[in-house]
Amino acid sequence: MERELSELRKVDRFRALPPVTARTGKYLELDGRRLLNLSSNDYLGIGDDSELLDSYLDECRSKGYSMTSSSSRLLTGNHPLYTQLENELSRLYGRQAALVFNSGYHANIGILPALSGRHDLILSDKLNHASIIDGMRLAEAQSQRYRHRDYGHLEELLAAAEGRYRQVFIVTESVFSMDGDLADLEKLVALKKRHHAVLLVDEAHGAGVFGKTGLGLCEVSGLQKEIDIVIGTFGKSFASTGAYAVMDSLFRDYLVNTVRPFIFTTALPPAVLGWSLLTLRGQVPMASRREHLQQIASRLRSELVACGFDVPGESHIVPVITRTDERAVSLAQRLRESGFLCLPVRPPTVPQNTARVRISLRSILEWEDLAPLPDLFLGRAGR
């Protein structure tokens, strides 16, 4: 272990837990320094709404919401708030059913192994999140990864699988967490119909940010009823804890009986479930926040590209590709010294030679907050 850790230090890949001491609005205190927080997934700023939180804490006290469930859902942990939350999710998405999980990781390492067996095939976008990759590893099914957003390659794999498997599953993120680019859901739905596949879409970084009512790219495309299972998280835009999947009732009944991370884990506390229900409902009318977020992201990306940087994507996640780990670390350090928290992302989180500084934007930011960044990336004093 010492030898491996030493090697990680040599190549600028050693990681340590940051000593975060406070978070207030746009800012975060790290090592005693106040920094503009550009590394948060609280995309709508709900987590920084102290009035909303204070009001909810009063509600928790008045209704006696506990901070623990002390049991799995299949025993005594299935609080009535679960039913309310799942009914609200299925209503919003226009689907028959929903199922709440303890985290997005729980959902992704549980659903694929539960649905697929050794006579099945899973086809996954090459840049899908680690939780999806781990779900495929746990599944008994065969798996292949198609080139990132290369739907011609996916169709080749689907055609080659014709008649060879009991069932084929296609799984993708909607907004890819490291590149900030978007899946083409219309093409994916067309392919799943043509080849009778089952389509799973992880909206972890899309829910809350896209769509008139914040249901993600599936809402933008109008295809939320065509995707077999839509997975989302409460831990990002909805500023809570846990995750969910919306689907038909048959899928839900089957998953309740087969998903190991669901069956064998303690249920979420009622206090968390009530907060998730509150923030889920509260984000629905936040269309103006979503629009503002995309506007500042588009402007920042355009200015960074104009400065000569490689900045892929088309969302609120703005990665500046540095190629080398050393440059990502040094750029992130330069930004920190100037008052900005943008963290470096290195392999194995991203492929070799694609290290980057990842900027994660929120609707509570204004352009004036971000304007100095292009010059700072160039090594010049901020504007």
Image (tube, rainbow, N blue to C red):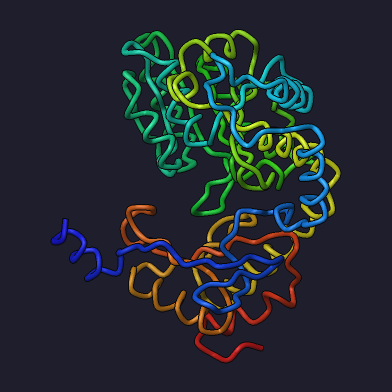
Tell me if residue 324 comes above or below residue 363 in the rendering. Answer: below
- Quarter of the image for residue 117 reads top left
Q: Tell me the quadrant of the picture where the C terminus can be found.
A: bottom right
Q: In the drawing, does residue 338 fall left or right of residue 300?
A: left
Q: Is residue 251 above or below residue 216?
A: above
The residue lying toward the viewer, choosing from 380 and 365, is 365
Judge from the rendering whether residue 236 lies leftward or rightward of residue 116; answer left or right: right
Q: Position of residue 156 (x, y in %)?
A: 40, 27
Residue name at image x 43 percent, y 29 percent:
109
Identify which residue, 268 or 238, lies in the foreground: 268
**Could you tell me how many numbered marks the image carries?**
0
Determine the residue positioned at 67% across, 31% down.
270
Name the residue rendered at 54%, 14% in the picture: 75
**Furthest residue toward bottom:** 381
Quadrant in the picture for the N terminus: bottom left
Of all residues, the one furthest to the left in this rendering is 3
**Whether residue 39 is situated above or below residue 171 in the rendered picture:** below
Q: Is residue 69 above or below residue 56?
A: above
Q: Quadrant of residue 68?
A: top right
Residue 353 in percent (x, y) is at: 33, 62
**Residue 102, percent from left and from top:** 54, 32
Corner quadrant of residue 6? bottom left
**Left/right of residue 259 with respect to residue 283 in the rendered view:** left
The residue depicted at 33 percent of the width and 57 percent of the height is: 347
Q: Residue 175: horizontal and vertical position, in percent?
A: 58, 45
**Left or right for 64, reference 187:** right
Front position in the image: 316 or 154: 316
